[in-house]
Amino acid sequence: MDVDVDVAVVGAGAAGLSLALRLARPPLGARRVTAVLLAAPPGPSRTARRTWCYWESGPGPYDEAVTASWQRLRVRSAGGRIVDAAIAPLRYKMLDSQAFEALAGRVLSDSSCVRREEALVERVESVPGGAVAHARRADGTRVRVRARWVFDSRPPARLPPARTTLLQHFRGWFVRTRTPRFDPAAVELMDFRTPQPAHGLSFGYVLPTGACEALVEYTEFSRGPLGRDGYDRALRHYLTQVLGAGAYEITATEQGVIPMTDGDFPRRAGACVFRVGAAAGATRPSTGYTFSAVQRQVLAVAAALHAGRRPLPPRAHSARSHLMDAVLLHALDRGRVDGPALFTHLFSRVPAPRLLRFLDGRTSLLEDLSIGLHVPVAAMLGCALALPFTPRRAHRPTR
C-alpha cells in the first residue's frame, strides 16, 4: 500500500500524538496539511502505558483526558521536614497515556486531513523532495508513506556523547489501600525519606487520586537502572515503612527510564526528516520533565506547516537553561552537592510558581540569578569551571 501526504509522523507517544492533534485542529484560515500518524501495532514494539505530568495555568487542550490535577505540592527532606507549597495560578496535571490516545483517536476519526495507521516503521529513506517511511502492519502487509516532511519521535538508538549522563529510572504502583492513607489535595513531589544511591539521588513520588488510591513511584537519578526486584523492594519499603500505608492492593504498574544528559540531540536526521520530542532534546536534563517542552515544539512545528514554512523543530530549552542543567548534573554525579538537601532548600526558599517556571525554562535572567542565590555557589561554580575540561563520552549504563 502506498500513501502520499504532506507529513508523516512516526511514533504515537506524547510527541507523535501531540503533533497529530495539532495538525488535525488547524487554526482558521490555515493552509491544509495532510498527515499520517504511524503507530506501532499492539505488541512488544508499542510503548507500555505510562503517565505524563506537567503544569499549566488555566484550562489546557487535553483537560478532558486528564486523570487529576492539584494546586499543592509537597517536598519532604530526608529527615522528614515538610515543605508544603501552593502553586496557583498553576495546576499540576496527570495525564494517562491511554486516555490521551483515546482523545487523539476521537479527534483523528473526525479529521479529514490526518489519519492513523497502525504499522511499525522499519526505516525512513530520504528521496528527492521529501522522504519515504517504510512500515509493516501486524499482518505483514507493507506500507510505504511518501511525505514532504517526516517527523520521527521514536527514541534514538543511542544517546549522544555527553559530559554527564544520569538516568531517571522509576517503577510505579497504582495502589488501593483499605483505609484512607493519602491526601487527595496535594502531590508528594519529592519525598527524600528513601535510601540514597552512591551517585545522584532517590525519592518517593505520590500522585493521589483519592483518599485510598494513588500512583506511588520510587524514582532514582543515578548512573544505571535497577532490576525489577530492586524497584519492588524499594516500593514495598516506601509504602509500608515510610508511608505506613497498611494493607494495599496493586491495580496496575508502570516503569520507565528517562535520560538526563547534557548531550546535544540533533533535531535533523535528513534533508526533510526531523526528530521531535524527547528524541530532539525536549527532556529537561535536570528534572526529566518532557511534556511541556514537547507541546512548545509541536506547536511551533504545526504553525510552520500551516503557514507553509520550513518546519524545523525549535530547540526545546535555551542555551542558558542547558548550561545550568549541565552544571547541576555534573554536581550531582560527582557528589559535589547533596541533591535532597538542594531541592528541599529550593522549594522552601523560592516561591513554588516561580520555581516551576524555572524548571520549565520560562524564567528571566534576573529570576534565574535570584534562584541561583539559594544553591551552593562555591560547589556550582567549581563544576561550571570544570565543564570545559570534561570530555564528552558515549553513555554506558552501570548498576
Image (cartoon, rainbow, N blue to C red):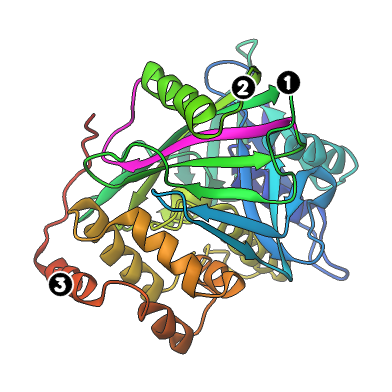
Question: Badge 2 is on which residue?
Answer: 246
- Dot 2 falls on a residue whose secondary structure is loop
In this rendering, position of residue 60 left or right of residue 315: right
Q: Earlier in the sequence, mark 2 or mark 3?
A: 2
> Which secondary structure dominates the residues rendered in magenta?
strand
Q: Image quadrant of residue 354?
A: bottom right
Q: Which mark is residue 382?
A: 3
In this rendering, position of residue 388 left or right of residue 182: left
Between disc 3 and disc 1, the foreground one is 1
Is 221 contained in the magenta span? Answer: yes
The residue sitting at the left extreme is 389
Q: Image quadrant of residue 196?
A: top left
Q: Is residue 185 above or below residue 3?
A: below
Would you call the spot at circle 2 few (<14 residues within 10 Å), some (14-19), or many (20 or more)?
A: few
Would you call the spot at circle 3 few (<14 residues within 10 Å), some (14-19), or many (20 or more)?
A: few
Report the amino acid beneath label 3: Gly
| Residue 320 x %, y % | 37, 76
Q: Which mark is residue 178?
A: 1
Considering the image in quadrants, where does the C terminus appear?
Answer: top left
Which residue appears at 70% of the width and 23% of the height?
177
Tell me the distance, in whole angstroms, between the alpha carbons under discs 3 and 1: 50 Å
| Residue 263 x %, y % | 29, 56
- Dot 1 falls on a residue whose secondary structure is loop
